Image: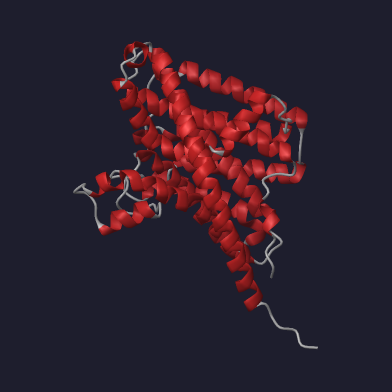
Amino acid sequence: MPINFSAMQLSKTHHQIEGLQIWRAIAVILVAALHLMQMMGGSGSLAMVRFGNLGMFGVDIFFVISGFILGLTALRAGSGEPRFESLHFIARRILRILPIYWIVILFPLTRWLRSSEVSGFTFLDFWFLLPGLSYPRVHLIIGLAWTLIFEMFFYYVLTVFLRITIRDAVRNTIAALVLLVVVGEFLGIRRSGLVIVMNPILLEFVMGNITALGFQRFGRQRRTGIAMLVAGVLAAGLVTFYTTTNVALEQNVLVGVDMLPRVGTWGVAAWLLVSGMVFWGPQVRSRLGKMLVEVGNGSYSIYLTSAISTEMISRLMARIPIGFLRSGPLVLREGIALVCVILTGMVCFWFVETPLLRWLNGRYKSIFRRRVAATAPVVRV
């Protein structure tokens, strides 16, 4: 059965895609700012704690967006042939995530390989972002790749249900992830492997899936979207203000500390923001909005390269003989560094990720179509 390659569109209108790209841009800016603050030694003041927590909020936004986009993609594959649609789905995800990840990790790979913790199993886990038996006891090649392990696990679960129950793949994925989290609450998840596959943060993908189901059924609902967006802004503001302890730690996620409260606060706020943008679907006309859309397009490259560029830019600024770069106000130094980190990621997006994806997608379409044609039944007249 032929595969419809245009079915990878993310929404019914171009405007919804732009709105989500703005949230992606904001999310990656928040996360990059958090990494810079950690690298440049921000003070332990309450304001910095709140800012750090808001930075971690970017991860919650990313997870909800992924749940929505991939859920909607799966829903639109529901009329296809399960074997081909499931293979097509996971192949496109792998092409999107792994090749550019492999390129970026080549830079810190040699330092990681010198670690005495490395074995064949750990290398396999980290090379393919698997929720294996070694993580989180062993450090990743780039620390922020822990989020990609959750992303890839979500993709694998959705692929399985596309293969066996294509029409109900999204609903069954929701049920499976909720069941895993419930079981994890009883068994305990503070062990390798389980800390990924039973972590309550998976419920943020579920929230995105729920939005996909709602959007598929009801379409654009402007008033509802605006109401949800306003509620999301208020929720994010309240959670940021009333959370006075540092929760911007990946260790909290990876040992399962207070994860249900996090999902019920930060996760719900992210869901309201993303869902509001989806159902509202505003047009992006301003120059700032279009700039944010472009940053959102390059958010994956920015996210990956920030692990390296943050360290390099921080060290470079400390050596440049310019007073305000070395000892000026933290907000100024971090702001300059943040612009440099974003520009570095955008260069990677424009000159590495985009050409690479264009070439890989072209090769994939050619190979996949040949395989489909070869397996198609021959009708003799």
- Point out the residue furthest to the right here: 381
Q: Residue at x 39, y 52 (%)?
A: 131
Relative to residue 344, is residue 356 depicted above or below?
below
Q: Quadrant of residue 375?
A: bottom right
Please tell me how many numbered marks the rendered image carries.
Answer: 0
Q: Split into 4 quadrants, where in the image is the N terminus?
A: bottom right
* Horizontal relation, residue 298 to residue 285: left or right: left
Looking at this view, is 162 or 58 the one in front?
58
Q: At which x and y percent is residue 13?
A: 75, 41
Q: At which x and y percent is residue 77?
A: 67, 58
- Point out the residue furthest to the bottom here: 381
Q: Residue at x 71, y 29 (%)?
A: 284
Q: Quadrant of residue 336?
A: top left
Q: Residue at x 76, y 41 (%)?
A: 219
Q: How is the image coloured?
A: secondary structure
- Point out the residue furthest to the front here: 321
Looking at this view, is 83 or 109 the one in front?
109
Q: At which x and y percent is residue 328?
A: 36, 11
Relative to residue 337, is residue 74 depicted above or below?
below
Q: At which x and y percent is residue 264?
A: 51, 31
Relative to residue 42, is residue 199 depicted above or below?
below
* Horizontal relation, residue 308 to residue 76: left or right: left
* Horizontal relation, residue 372 to residue 344: left or right: right
Looking at this view, is 70 or 191 the one in front?
70
